[in-house]
Amino acid sequence: MAFYVFLTLTIMWFIFMTYLSHQNGEHTGRTSRKLAEELSEHICFLGADINGLNGKLRRFAHIIVFAVLTVLLGLTLQFGELSMWWLIIVPVWSYVDEATKPLIQGRHFSWFDVGQNLIGTVIGAVVVWIL
């Protein structure tokens, strides 16, 4: 049962993160700016620098979404008693996700973002290993 729960969560997370990642440039910028404004308004210790907070959110989003994907996939593989070698899918997607960006209006390929994705993947793999 746990296998199917985590498989469903993994698929849903993958769809969610891919949807966010493949929005056009204007829409993704508007979404992150709105989130920065909301966080700044409700969490006073973050400060009032909306542009700085927006930049940090956009940078850390790569790490967070790929770490979560790696953890979910790792747990799915563990519960399904499948080979952990299937985790190789996540670092491959780290590149493919960015490689498809030039096909979207207002988006571009970034090696820095690939690196951020890979950092998230490594963090997620360490969490899975600890669990």
Image: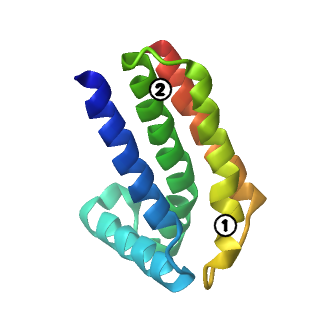
Residue contact at pointers 1 and 2, CB within 8 angstroms:
no
Instruction: Decide which of tag 1 and tag 2 comes sooner along the chain.
Output: 2
| 91 left or right of 39 in image | right
The amino acid type found where label 1 is placed reads Thr
Residue 52 vertical position relative to residue 74 in the rendered view, above or below: below
Residue lying at 41% horizontally and 56% vertically, measured from the top left: 15
Q: Which mark is residue 100?
A: 1
Which residue is disc 2 drawn over? 74
Residue lying at 39% horizontally and 57% vertically, measured from the top left: 16
Who is closer to the viewer here, 87 or 42? Answer: 87
In the picture, the quarter occupied by the C terminus is top left
Which residue, as the protein is rendered here, is positioned at the far right? 111
- Label 1: state its secondary structure: loop
In the picture, the quarter occupied by the N terminus is top left
Instruction: Name the spot of residue 111 as percent of width and height, x first.
Output: 77, 57
Residue lying at 49% horizontally and 18% vertically, measured from the top left: 82
Who is closer to the viewer here, 65 or 83? Answer: 83
| 95 left or right of 22 in image | right
Q: Which mark is residue 66?
A: none
Residue lying at 41% horizontally and 24% vertically, measured from the top left: 75
Mark 1–mark 2 Cα distance, whole angstroms, equals 25 Å
Mark 2: few/some/many CA within 10 Å (<14, 14-19, 20+): many
The amino acid type found where label 2 is placed reads Gly
